Image (cartoon, coloured by chain):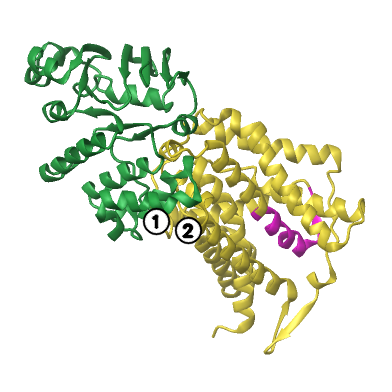
């Protein structure tokens, strides 16, 4: 049984329908990407899975339990953590406090120190910046903090929303190295990326979304072979039919 | 120039106003709601003092605890019964709800108790004066300064050192992301209302202590003061609220001694002019907050 099953998910922003029935699956230990242009419904899918957005129709099943329409705080406790688009660091709080809140859902006093140590091994910069306000960190550092914060919850499924957005090429490289590393450590990851070519180099499978529907699903190799990725992003059939950017 | 009496007066008035505005800003920070029922929490605390003394015949210290708890309970219940159901609706719906709560509470005491003022018994220390280095000052002025200092230290520890405090600060900045950390929305919002009620209750003891009476519209004046002080100090951080409270107290006292006797009755008009100037030239208040404007949704 897949770890996460999304079936026929429909979601709207007011009167604007953003998802027209998305179905996808993520198995334990897999690294899966959701690809597509702006407005294809990638972030909306993640928001619906985490309960930030209430889907109009469809179901989300995680580890055999239906979690559709549950509150975000419930879903994170069940083991799904989202690294939101734009990083969403608590700018007024220190790095330490950001990480402490990351551990809120699964805090155990005796484990906390060890968890911090683990995070510092992956992100040494966060140890240096431990007492600084999150808002004072650079974009790349904030992205690391956002990922570290999500990992403090010991998620069974980690969802990353556009982790490379707005980062320098060097920083983007680092983030992709990190994603690979996390996967090798056994994490299950659902990755949303606009940078399709980079994503396809690291993921096992991918779903290509267009206009709120799954247009193609398959392994990374399948996708590279059968879909002209450049055309999808550079004015292919779907580019002009996507009228409502969300 | 600055004599001790003026200093103590200003500090005590500023302390009281700081407590008032801090309670208002805590809820604003998280719900982005100016809670116009806030004054009624003070009013209920006043009736709590009155009832526990005249009906229950509790000793003075117990009446104070009773009064404060009445405010805390009223604040919490208003969150549960009135604000929670409309929380995800528009900001206007929330504000209108706060007016409804305010009118409901005022009329409840009007019908259940009396439209007329009730005398509130406070310990004699509230009406005694003391002489410090030649300055004569009411003891309650020193009490309010000490109480506020203790409350502010405790509040600061709560916000900085406890996970609940961190969660509240985070929620004031990015509410949805805070929930994505697993922090229940109800927890931070209820906590904000409970602490808001607690501050209103404590402030109420000193507010009522000045007139030794309570009536159904007792809450109107402190609400207005808290609102003005937060506009002046800054709506977006607890620090702004506290600074605003002290600045308001200072302005009020400066106007009181500098305005000629014939103008003193226009003191409030001068205060409002200052507020208008703030709204025109520094609408974010003295202390700018880094918080975003995301509402609960």
Q: Provide the letter of the chain coloured green.
A: A
Q: Quadrant of residue A40?
A: top left
Identify the subunit bearing mark 2: B
Q: Nearer the viewer, residue B276 or B68?
A: B68
Q: Is residue B161 left or right of residue B195?
A: left
Q: Position of residue B144 (x, y in %)?
A: 67, 68
Q: Quadrant of the C terminus of chain A?
A: top left
Residue under pointer 2: B240
Instruction: Work out whether mark 2 precedes mark 1 in sequence or the reverse, and give the earlier one.
Output: 2
- The tag on residue B288 is 1
Q: Is residue A207 left or right of residue B127?
A: left
Q: Position of residue A77 (x, y in %)?
A: 47, 34
Residue B213 belongs to the span the image colors magenta: yes
Q: Residue at x 26, y 38 (%)?
A: A182
Q: Position of residue B197 (x, y in %)?
A: 66, 49
Q: Residue at x 88, y 56 (%)?
A: B53
Q: Is residue A36 visible?
A: yes
Q: Residue at x 33, y 49 (%)?
A: A118
Q: Quadrant of the N terminus of chain A?
A: top left
Q: Which stretch is magenta?
A: B199-215
Q: Position of residue B18 (x, y in %)?
A: 58, 61
Question: Marks 2 and 1: CB-CB under 8 Å?
Answer: yes
Marks 2/1: CA–CA distance: 8 Å
Q: Nearer the viewer, residue A99 or A142?
A: A99
Q: Chain B drawn in what color?
A: yellow
């Amino acid at each position: 049984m897949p770890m996460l099953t999304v079936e026929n998910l429909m979601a709207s922003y007011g009167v604007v329908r953003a998802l027209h029935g998305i179905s996808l699956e993520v198995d334990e230990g897999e690294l899966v990407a959701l690809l597509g242009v702006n407005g294809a419904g990638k972030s909306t899918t993640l928001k619906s899975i985490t309960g930030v957005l209430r889907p109009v129709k469809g179901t989300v099943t995680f580890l055999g339990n239906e979690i559709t329409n549950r509150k975000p705080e419930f879903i994170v406790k069940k083991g799904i953590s989202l690294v939101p688009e734009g990083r969403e660091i608590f700018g007024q709080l220190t790095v330490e406090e950001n990480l402490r809140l990351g551990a809120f859902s699964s805090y155990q006093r005796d484990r906390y120190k060890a968890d911090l140590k683990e995070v510092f091994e992956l992100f040494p910069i966060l140890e240096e910046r431990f007492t600084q306000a999150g808002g004072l960190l650079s974009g790349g550092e904030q992205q690391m903090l956002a990922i570290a914060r999500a990992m403090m919850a010991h998620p069974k499924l980690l969802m990353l929303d556009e982790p490379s957005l707005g980062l320098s090429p060097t920083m983007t490289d680092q983030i992709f190295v990190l994603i690979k590393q996390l996967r090798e450590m056994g994490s299950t990851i659902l990755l949303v990326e606009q940078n399709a070519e980079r994503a396809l180099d690291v993921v096992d499978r991918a779903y290509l979304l267009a206009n709120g529907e799954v247009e193609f699903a398959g392994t990374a190799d399948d996708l590279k072979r059968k879909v002209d990725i450049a055309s999808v992003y550079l004015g292919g059939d779907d580019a002009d039919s996507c009228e409502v950017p969300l | 120039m600055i004599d001790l009496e003026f200093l103590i007066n200003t500090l005590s008035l500023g302390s009281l106003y700081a407590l008032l505005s801090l309670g208002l800003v805590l809820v604003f920070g998280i719900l982005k709601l100016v809670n116009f029922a806030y004054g009624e929490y003070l009013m209920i605390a006043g009736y709590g003092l009155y009832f526990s003394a005249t009906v229950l015949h509790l000793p003075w210290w117990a009446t104070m605890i009773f009064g404060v708890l009445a405010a805390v309970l009223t604040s919490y219940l208003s969150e549960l019964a009135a604000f929670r159901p409309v929380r995800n609706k528009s900001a206007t719906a929330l504000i209108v709800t706060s007016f409804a709560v305010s009118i409901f509470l005022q009329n409840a005491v009007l019908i259940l108790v009396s439209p007329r003022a009730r005398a509130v018994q406070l310990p004699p220390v509230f009406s005694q004066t003391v002489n410090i280095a030649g300055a004569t000052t009411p003891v309650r002025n020193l009490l309010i300064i000490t109480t506020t200092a203790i409350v502010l230290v405790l509040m600061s520890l709560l916000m900085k050192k406890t996970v609940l405090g961190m969660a509240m600060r985070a929620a004031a900045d990015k509410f949805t992301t805070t929930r994505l950390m697993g922090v229940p929305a109800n927890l931070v919002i209820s906590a904000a209302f409970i602490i808001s009620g607690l501050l209103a209750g404590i402030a109420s003891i000193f507010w009522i202590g000045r007139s030794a009476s309570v009536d159904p519209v007792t809450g109107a004046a402190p609400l207005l003061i808290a609102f003005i002080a937060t506009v002046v100090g800054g709506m977006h951080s607890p620090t702004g609220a506290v600074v605003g409270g002290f600045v308001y107290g200072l302005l009020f006292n400066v106007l009181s001694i500098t305005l000629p006797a014939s103008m003193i009755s226009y003191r409030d008009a001068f205060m409002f002019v200052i507020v208008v100037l703030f709204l025109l030239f520094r609408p974010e208040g003295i202390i700018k907050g880094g918080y975003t404007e995301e509402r609960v949704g």
